[in-house]
Amino acid sequence: MHSKAVAVVMTLAKVACAIVSCATALMLVHIIPDLLSVKTRELILKNKAEELDREMGLILTQEETGRHVRMLTHEIRSTLDRDTILKTTLVELGKTLGLEECALWMPSRNGLSLQLSHALNYQIPVGANIPINLPVVNDVFNSNRAIRVPYTCQLAKMRPPAGGRYLAPEVVAVRVPLLNLSNFQMNNWPDGSSRSYAIMVLILPTDSVRKWRDHELELVDVVADQVAVALSHAALLEESMLARDQLVDQNVALDLARREAETAIHARNDFLAVMNHEMRTPMHAIIALSSLLLETELTPEQRAMIETILKSSNLLATLINDVLDLSRLEDGSLVLDLGSFNLHAVFKEAMDLIKPIASVKKLSMALILASDLPICAVGDEKRLMQIILNVVGNGVKFTKEGHVSIIASVAKLDSLRDWRPPEFYPMQSDGHFYLRVQVKDSGCGVLPQDIPHLFTKFTQSQTRSNRTNSSAGLGLALCKRFVNLMGGHIWMESEGPEKGTTAVFIVKLGICNANPNDLSVKQVTPVVNHRSADLHGHRPIFRETDQVAFSGSRDTLKLKEIHLDRRCAFASPAMLPVINQRKHKDAKWAAII
């Protein structure tokens, strides 16, 4: 029994062990892959940890590089002095990267060589030159990043050779673009072949086995770009300061020239004023005496000579007046004498003065006054008459046969805006209008290239100067200045020689409220019959300091039966009370001016 029970127990134990073994085997089927996957995951995590370490190191390196770049950029951009920028760059790069030498080669003025301009330790004298066509130099110029160069190349000869060393230190070189003011002109950015470059050379210490790392090379590239920007700013500043100094010098010279020109103009105008005054007095005497001679009995030959003298004297007097007016216009001393006048009467009076000259040349004259032309106007009547006479007289002078027409109207501003020159700005208002006068002739015409020069003083058209005339070239120059003074514009048109000329001027006149009938009466000059004047019992006094003028005036008055007292011929107004008290108490005195 006992052995049977033991056998049963052992059998059950064996069955239980078998069941446990089966269960264990089944469990191992699931556990073993899990164990294997844990190992795999451990390896993956280890690799990821290593990658994270590398990335963290790269981030730290980038941060350090960025910090160095910011520091170097701040130091470089803290000044705009070229020499300070370069020295600061080399010193800071040497500290940051632990360099043994850092140098900068700048292009020479002729562009054929590179010159050592800055170095940290100056083992070779600054100013040494190397040819720019070396292969290593071309390699650096053609690369936009820092490249390694041999320690034995001429770019790296700032230090003595590494004697006794097993391995020479690494050297890198990077190009630095040099820009100037002309590179910043619009649409003028230079291509790579036309730019100029400097070369920055960096040498690691000779007592170490350091190698250039990628982040260090990136730092060198970034610093080179920052140096290029800083140098371009410095170049801009230098060229701007140079241009400013040149402008200051030019302004000083121009101001000096302007003051000298103004002094010369004032001196010339003063001289002209004095000379005109001194020339007018004898000229008026010549005109007066010539007129008196024409009233006497003369032979035809004598009369012709006197008429020539009188005509030449009148021409010279007109020229003197024109020169004086021109000088006063140029120095700004001439102002307009504004007043109300009869505009229609001005044109009719101008026609009356021009018609006798035109009739001698058998020219037909026509005056057309537009219906909208006001009768009354406000302006300088004398200067307007002078402009009309000059322009119309110019047309008559250069017309052999045919006609001369005058058309006066109110200018329409809408039509003026389409063609007006930039210096002429007509503005519409209720208080004024623009008078447009067109003078058209069938004369010799003008070459198109001569038209811009017609209004220059002492200048004539080539077509007109070839003809017989007595013009001095002042008439149109005076007209232009008077028209400009009146806020207008004058121009001429011609299709060419022998095709006539059209002169047009526009002036600004005021609108007056006076009665046109009153103005027309004022235009009539009262006629005084000096011959029948009652001067009985009067002794005229003539104030004149020139003997010749006195003689001419005395002879003129003598023809009117007015006799001058020679003793009082040079009396001044202050002497009149004395003369009245001392002499001729029974007579009345009359002063003739």
Image (cartoon, rainbow, N blue to C red):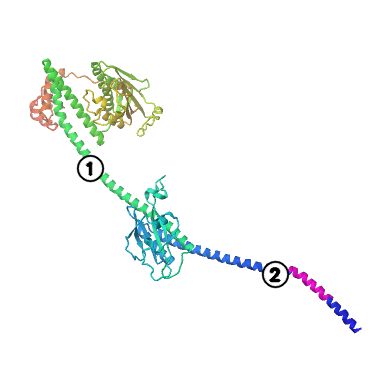
> Would you say the magenta stretch is mainly helix, strand or loop?
helix
Q: Nearer the viewer, residue 268 or 157?
A: 157
Q: Which circle, 2 or 1, is nearer the viewer?
A: 2
247 left or right, relative to 19 = left
- On the image, which quarter does residue 504 sit in? top left
User: Residue 106: x, y in percent?
Assistant: 36, 57
Q: Residue at x 37, y 67 (%)?
A: 161
Kindly identify the amino acid type of the residue bearing the numbered disc 2. Answer: Leu
Magenta range is 15-30
**Quarter of the figure with residue 171:** bottom left
Mark 1 element type: helix
**Element carrying mark 2:** helix
Q: Which mark is residue 260?
A: 1
Q: Amino acid at mark 1?
A: Glu
Q: Residue 196: horizontal and vertical position, in percent?
A: 38, 52
Residue carrying label 2? 35
Report the residue at 37% width, 26% height from top.
411
Q: Position of residue 494 (x, y in %)?
A: 32, 24
Quadrant of the rendered image containing residue 342: top left
Residue 257 x %, y %: 24, 43
As for residue 295 lying within the magenta part, the answer is no
Do we see residue 564 in this rendering?
yes
509, 40: nearer the viewer: 40
